[in-house]
């Protein structure tokens, strides 16, 4: 594999103009096609083979006139009650105006809350939301503005159509991440050009991914969170992957290699680690299909595509750009008075083996000298951070957690205050009636439902035209996010409904949005152990192949679990328990969105491979060279700590920037990813890894002979099988850069001519 990557890097350098042109064409084509296709995201969730989905399917089949989307018109009197003359006139005018809108099938009567200060009217459309969403919402918004202009009433919009049309502004966070990443890269490289290469690569990858996502959205349903998550992950890994390769390239240049040889060898070594880590991320994220939820599967596929594009750019576009940069990669330097001038740091500040001792050498020896102390401290810290996971409660966010600047949130609050918390999450019961049964036979069911302590209201059963089905609206006493609502749904399904319809032949399915969220959370919860087990097994096998060891992969899996557990724990403490939630722009406690833990696990386990491979490959290389495990650990940390720290700071800055989003789901992802990367790059990589490797000693590298013969030999970062490197006869940093071949096609670097 390394030889193929070496040849790929060399070809990219030699044909750099064609490579850059090809990627620009791909990016432009993706954006243009995405714009032409006009794809839009959709927050419609389907969960096959759960009761709430069955209830929805029955309603779609048996009530075709109600197959369209719906909206709620929520009115609040600006003074007095809605029954007063002036407010009543304003409400009647608004209802009449909405009834005249295109595609509106029916506008229900105004339902008044006790006291008459708040009222709700339902609007039923004849077509699905995706077909009319933006235009229909614009008309509703115009009606609301006209009602507000009277000064007598305030009109807010709720229901399915406004909830899908009103999406919070979530763009711009990646810009903050880019700015911080640029600062980190400038400090790490000290060169504007070296900094610009990873940033430019990530930008091009982001543009390409965005265009392809828009194109795909025209064909399949893509959740609104998917492109945000893909941007978050893609930018982070794109910059990190480029950082690893550029760092290795500059080390080669400092050793005197030619431009072409240096870039090619960087792709063959660090590029191999990038390919390995990126492939692991892609496989892990695609494993989200285990959840059996189409929207989550697509979300994973979009994120995986983003990572795959970044890997492809790093292996092809980056060496081409390195060829253009030549020796000028360090030409535009920033003044760094703290940078050592001796050979301790090597050219351009990169680590050169055999140089002067660094702080990381001293730290590695400190951990090796007291491994039990540092191991215990690290495990205790991560254990404390992980402890809140015991109280993890999965659920979904709704309009009640949205920004108060949105009309859907204001409508939610008015309904909750006027009618009760449960009205925002009614349960819809679809009833399949056998021949000879009518809605009158459902009276015992209505009575049993009304008698339940968790039910506030039961509307009369409404039959379809054929009399083969009916729908019942049941309002819980608690809000959709309340844990008591989960208990109510299970009690109705398991006890109340079966007893009430026994002997009638009627089949009753409890649905509605609240029930769908409950079913989806329980689906994820039941599949999560299988998913975690599959990802763990994959990572152990891959690391066993790479490092020819049993202990290293098992230890890595355990430590990754600790870092991910710490991420989960912080999310629970902030969002579910409310510890410091206002610091993150959240004004209430809420359950952890059901697909967040699974998605975080997939992404984080894959990302941890970056640092795992980068660090342990250096340790193993030193161990094979020296035969001394302790010295190999110290040298491995010293030679990789700076790059890992820089990469982690970039990842953290990119992920943490998304905590500024107004969407609580995006906040959870941003905080979880940033926390896990911080823990992984600090406590795990520079404390737990050296401590455990010191304690295990040579047993780190033990592998049974039969297993050694059975496993394939996958060299990552070792560069085994590469030709002898070509060096500059007299390298001059002031010369070089655009090393184009001469008109006859002969390279200007004679060492590679053969």
Image (cartoon, rainbow, N blue to C red):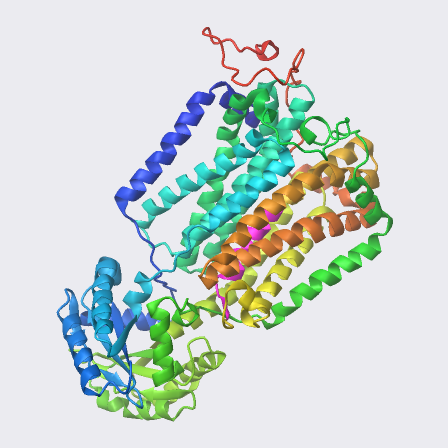
Where residue 367 appears, x then y in whole percent?
Answer: 82, 49
Is residue 122 highlighted in magenta? no
Left or right? Give the position of 202 relative to 404: right
For residue 446, above or below residue 160: below
For residue 365, above or below residue 438: above
Looking at the rendered image, the quarter that the C terminus falls into is top right
Where residue 378 appears, x then y in whole percent?
Answer: 75, 57
Farthest residue toward the left? 100
Left or right? Give the position of 84 relative to 586: left
Can residue 609 be seen here? The reply is no
Identify the main secondary structure in magenta: helix
Q: Nearer the viewer, residue 449 or 404?
A: 404
For residue 339, above or below residue 721: below
Q: Nearer the viewer, residue 13 or 399?
A: 399
Which residue is at 44% across, 25% downward? 19
Residue 10 falls in which quadrant of the image?
A: top right
Looking at the rendered image, the quarter that the N terminus falls into is top right
Q: How many marks?
A: 0
Residue 723 falls in which quadrant of the image?
A: top right
* Span of residues in magenta: 591-610
Where residue 476 appears, x then y in whole percent?
Answer: 39, 84
């Amino acid at each position: 594999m390394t030889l193929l990557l070496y040849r790929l890097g060399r070809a990219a350098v030699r044909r750099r103009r064609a490579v850059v042109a090809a990627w620009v064409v791909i990016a432009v084509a993706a954006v243009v096609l995405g714009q032409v296709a006009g794809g839009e995201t959709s927050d419609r969730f389907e969960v096959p083979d759960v009761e709430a989905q069955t209830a929805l399917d029955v309603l779609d089949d048996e009530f075709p006139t109600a197959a369209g989307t719906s909206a709620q018109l929520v009115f609040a009197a600006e003074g007095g009650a809605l029954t007063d003359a002036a407010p009543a006139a304003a409400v009647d005018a608004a209802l009449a105006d909405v009834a005249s809108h295109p595609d509106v099938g029916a506008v229900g009567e105004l339902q008044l809350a006790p006291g008459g200060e708040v009222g709700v009217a339902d609007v039923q459309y004849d077509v699905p939301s995706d077909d009319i969403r933006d235009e229909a919402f614009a008309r509703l918004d115009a009606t609301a503005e006209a009602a507000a202009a009277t000064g007598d009433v305030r009109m807010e919009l709720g229901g399915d159509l406004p909830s899908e049309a009103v999406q919070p502004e979530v763009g711009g966070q990646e810009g903050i991440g880019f700015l911080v990443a640029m600062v980190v890269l400038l400090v790490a490289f000290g060169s504007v050009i070296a900094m610009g290469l990873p940033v430019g690569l990530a930008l091009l990858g982001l543009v390409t991914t965005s265009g392809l996502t828009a194109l795909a959205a025209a064909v399949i349903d893509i959740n609104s969170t998917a492109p945000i998550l893909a941007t978050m992950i893609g930018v982070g890994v794109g910059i990190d992957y480029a950082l690893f390769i550029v760092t290795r390239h500059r080390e080669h240049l400092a050793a005197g290699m030619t431009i072409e040889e240096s870039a090619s060898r960087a792709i063959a070594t660090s590029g191999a680690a990038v390919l390995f880590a990126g492939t692991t991320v892609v496989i892990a994220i695609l494993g989200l299909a285990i959840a059996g939820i189409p929207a989550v599967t697509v979300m994973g596929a979009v994120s995986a595509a983003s990572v795959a594009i970044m890997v492809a750019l790093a292996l092809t576009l980056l060496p081409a750009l390195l060829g253009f940069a030549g020796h000028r990669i360090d030409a535009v330097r920033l003044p760094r008075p703290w940078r050592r001038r001796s050979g301790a740091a090597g050219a351009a500040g990169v680590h050169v083996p055999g140089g002067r001792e660094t702080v990381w050498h001293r730290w590695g020896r400190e951990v090796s000298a007291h491994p039990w102390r540092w191991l215990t401290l690290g495990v205790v810290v991560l254990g404390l951070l992980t402890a809140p996971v015991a109280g993890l409660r999965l659920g979904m966010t709704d309009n009640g957690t949205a920004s108060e600047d949105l009309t859907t949130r204001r409508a939610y609050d008015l309904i909750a205050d006027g009618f009760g918390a449960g009205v925002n999450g009614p349960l819809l019961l679809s009833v399949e009636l056998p021949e000879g049964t009518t809605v009158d036979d459902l009276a015992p069911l209505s009575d049993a439902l009304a008698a339940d302590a968790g039910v506030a209201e039961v509307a009369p059963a409404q039959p379809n035209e054929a009399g083969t089905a009916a729908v019942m609206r049941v309002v819980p006493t608690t809000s959709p996010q309340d844990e008591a609502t989960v208990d109510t749904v299970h009690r109705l399904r398991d006890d109340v409904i079966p007893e009430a319809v026994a002997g009638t032949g009627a089949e009753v399915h409890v649905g509605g949005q609240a029930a769908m969220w409950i079913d989806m959370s329980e689906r994820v919860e039941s599949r999560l152990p299988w998913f975690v087990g599959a990802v763990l097994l994959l990572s152990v096998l891959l690391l066993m192949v790479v490092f020819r060891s049993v202990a290293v992969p098992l230890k890595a899996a355990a430590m990754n679990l600790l870092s991910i557990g710490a991420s989960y724990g912080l999310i629970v403490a902030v969002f579910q328990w409310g510890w410091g939630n206002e610091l993150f722009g959240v004004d209430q406690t809420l359950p952890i969105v059901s697909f967040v833990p699974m998605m975080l696990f997939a992404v984080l386990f894959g990302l941890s491979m970056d640092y795992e491979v980068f660090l342990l490959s250096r340790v193993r290389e030193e161990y094979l060279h020296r035969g001394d495990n302790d010295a190999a650990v110290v040298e491995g940390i010293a030679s990789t700590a700076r790059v890992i720290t820089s990469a982690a700071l970039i990842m953290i800055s990119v992920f943490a920037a998304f905590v500024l989003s107004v969407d609580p789901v995006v906040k959870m992802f941003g905080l979880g990813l940033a926390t896990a990367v911080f823990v992984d790059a600090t406590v795990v990589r520079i404390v737990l890894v050296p401590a455990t490797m010191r304690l295990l000693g040579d047993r780190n590298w033990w592998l049974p002979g039969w297993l050694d013969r059975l496993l394939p030999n996958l060299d990552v970062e070792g560069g085994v099988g590469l030709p002898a490197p070509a060096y500059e006869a007299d390298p001059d940093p002031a010369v070089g850069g655009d090393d184009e071949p001469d008109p006859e096609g002969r390279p200007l670097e004679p060492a590679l001519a053969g």
